[in-house]
Image: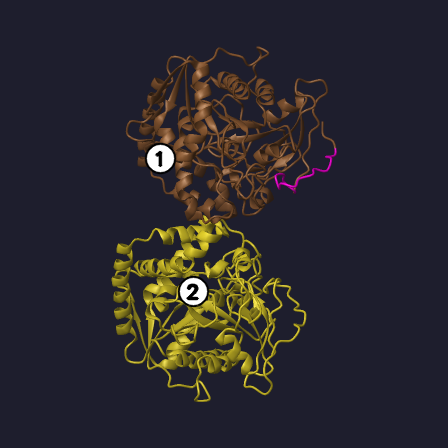
Chain colours: A yellow, B brown
């Protein structure tokens, strides 16, 4: 039910200041007592979804209906306390919004929070809410989870309904969430994954693949920092092998997703762009202009390349297998860097993020490592449908690291 | 001398609201008693030059020195009452600024004023000042002069020093000005062109070329509306011929300027773009991204094509000749149109504007025609150095039209 929103204390610039969307959770639900925030791409009835861009906000009407995913959480008892900043129309992975500023990364001061679910990650990492909703098209949950030191899942594509969210590229869009601890993370997951078994303790995967070429994408220091976590995962699972996912090099994998996702992203907003001539940061327009130039031939070639990745990953993930890999190639970079200084890290992170993006399978970030005090995450990646298995394994790994 | 600025009554949104730059004119100068405005690309000591973009303004320091062209006018007695809106970094010809709004076109309500010298044209057309400074790289004085019904000159390239202005593409940048009447226009010209003869009454050109292919670029109704003015010019000069400037078609001419100007414009701001990742309207970034993609081979080919235009126009303009052509292909289009709805008119206007841009010669707009009550201008175009001749002829044509 809609009520006046209590004032949010937001020292992190995580929340949107131009909306007072607030939904009190149902009494006596499984999530009662928990608070959450929703990235400003989720509709809340009666409020305009801003999408991180003032011209988007100014040219859209208030939502008629609350997004499915928000409503199901509120019905389960969680209280939505506000909307959070996002990169413009979700197109960015660093979390610096030219219009609304950069949410603070409480676990890496002076560093970006990661994006595009920047405000959600910031709010959870800073303890302003218990959990938060984000979305992940090309890495927008996984990257901020790694940079901010949070549990964060990109679920199986299609597993969580996209009704009532601002679409970027529907073949790649997913809804994910962040939490600081694996128990809260799993409680939310039971609701969002519509898991009726009452608990997320599926059988543990039987085989671990350590993705050698994915580790080679990351900084050497990141690999070293992640090693103890990899060791715990390996010992829990028992059987592990080190393999190259792509014999020809992982850097050849993101191109096909960039083409296919870019084409869809362009088609999604081209009419609005033409009508509105909106103000974007240079990088965001640049991305759309690049996407617009994609030819049908490039799309066809990308579809072929995509199927090769899908087939290869089916082989890798056969036999109840989970893959581990670095979530990001480095910890969060500093705020305010030159665009050109980040192109390399952006591309390396795309090499890591495109795997689950392409297969449609789930990937969870485990915030169990640091490098010079900065969070950096290890990911577990499974075949489509293995969301619960990953969440369950994440809990076991966390417990084993503490024990 | 710097003094507190009197409040500007600005019902046209022609002036920048975020600067109070004001320079009182010297007493007893040749321009004493006249007021003028300067497009916000001209430096005024102590004030930040905004360039029509808030991120440009936020990342630049106050000017240390007033632009040469402003100072010479103030020294001549004219009072600069304020700075005027411009398309972002002068990159636009319609005058709609996504950040600061669209100056009103007082002579064509509901229509764009034209740009990039939009506020200057609006302020003069609305009678807020006696004259105003603009700049013209690809048409930014000529187009708003035509749309707003003003005298406006793109001078010979290099004739008026560019010291202290925001550069777009130095091989094409020129400083021009607007006035409602040819007398005021000529008085200002004597100062800006540093004409020491005391009056602008040079010998009248001896031959008129009516540029047939340029008229074919314009709407049929525009051609009809301009015919009486063409007739007056022809009768004043006596000898006139109708010729095609480009036997292969004028639509082939603007490409080389777009390449060469685009390359320079990109080089001018690339470091700032990288550092700042600024917010632009979609179209402006699009233009820079397109410019960035220009190859060295395209530049070489464009240089060859440019020389062909220069040589051809040398032939056309030999023997003390002036060319007349429509300044714009149509009257001002409505405000708020879709981007795609304007690409055609933009390209046609480029075909007309690139001629003087390429030759480096002067072109003046005569505001002596209307179409359904909307201004549309005839241009006189001469060889480099013929600025005074064009201004003098403009006065004669205006007098003959009244007589």
Q: Which residues are magenta?
A: B4-17
Check residue B236 in the rendering and tell me which mark sits there, or answer none: none
- Chain letter of the residue carrying label 1: B
Q: Which residue is mark 2?
A: A139
**Prevalent SS, magenta region:** loop
**What residue is at 59 percent from the left and 20 percent from the top?**
B183
* Circle 2 Cα neighbour tier, 10 Å, few/some/many (<14 / 14–19 / ≥20): many
Q: Position of residue A101 (x, y in %)?
A: 57, 56
Q: In this rendering, is residue A396 above or below A42?
A: below
**At numbered mark 1, what does the secondary structure look like: helix, strand or loop?**
helix
Name the image quarter holding residue A384.
bottom left
Q: Quadrant of the C terminus of chain B?
A: top right
- Chain letter of the residue carrying label 2: A
Residue A342 seen: no
Q: Which residue is mark 1?
A: B255
Left or right relative to B80: residue A389:
left
């Amino acid at each position: 039910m809609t009520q006046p929103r209590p004032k949010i204390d937001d020292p992190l610039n995580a929340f949107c200041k131009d909306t007072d969307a607030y939904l009190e959770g149902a009494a006596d639900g499984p999530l009662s007592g928990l608070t959450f925030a929703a990235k400003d791409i989720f509709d809340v009835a009666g409020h305009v979804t801003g999408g991180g861009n003032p011209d988007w906000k100014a040219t859209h009407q208030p939502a008629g209906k609350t997004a499915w995913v928000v409503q199901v959480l509120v019905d389960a008892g969680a209280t939505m306390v506000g909307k959070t900043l996002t990169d413009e129309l979700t197109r960015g992975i660093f979390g610096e919004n030219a219009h609304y500023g950069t949410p603070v990364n409480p676990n890496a001061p002076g560093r970006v929070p990661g994006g595009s679910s920047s405000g959600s990650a910031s709010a959870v990492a800073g303890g302003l809410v218990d959990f938060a909703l984000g979305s992940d098209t090309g890495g927008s949950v996984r990257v901020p989870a790694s940079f901010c030191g949070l549990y964060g899942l990109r679920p199986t594509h299609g597993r969580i309904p996209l009704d009532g969210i601002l679409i970027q590229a529907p073949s790649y869009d997913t809804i994910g969430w962040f939490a600081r601890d694996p128990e809260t993370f799993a409680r939310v997951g039971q609701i969002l994954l519509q898991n009726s078994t009452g608990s997320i303790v599926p059988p543990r995967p039987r085989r671990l693949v350590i993705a050698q070429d994915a580790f080679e994408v990351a900084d050497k220091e990141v690999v070293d920092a992640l090693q103890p976590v990899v060791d715990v995962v390996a010992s829990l699972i028992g059987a592990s092998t080190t393999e190259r996912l792509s014999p020809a090099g992982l850097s050849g994998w993101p191109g096909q997703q960039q083409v296919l996702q870019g084409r869809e992203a362009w088609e999604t907003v081209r009419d609005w762009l033409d009508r509105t001539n909106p103000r974007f940061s240079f990088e965001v327009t640049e991305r759309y202009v690049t996407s617009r130039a994609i030819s049908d031939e490039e799309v066809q070639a990308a579809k072929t390349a995509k199927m090769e990745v899908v087939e290869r990953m089916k082989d890798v993930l056969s036999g109840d297998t989970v893959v581990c890999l670095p979530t990001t190639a480095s910890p969060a970079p500093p705020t305010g860097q030159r665009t050109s200084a980040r192109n390399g890290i952006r591309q390396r992170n795309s090499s890591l993020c495109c795997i689950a993006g392409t297969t449609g399978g789930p990937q969870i970030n485990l915030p169990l490592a640091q490098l010079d005090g900065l969070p950096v995450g290890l990911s577990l990646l499974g075949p489509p449908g293995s969301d619960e298995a990953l969440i369950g394994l994440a809990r076991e790994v966390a417990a084993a690291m503490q024990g």
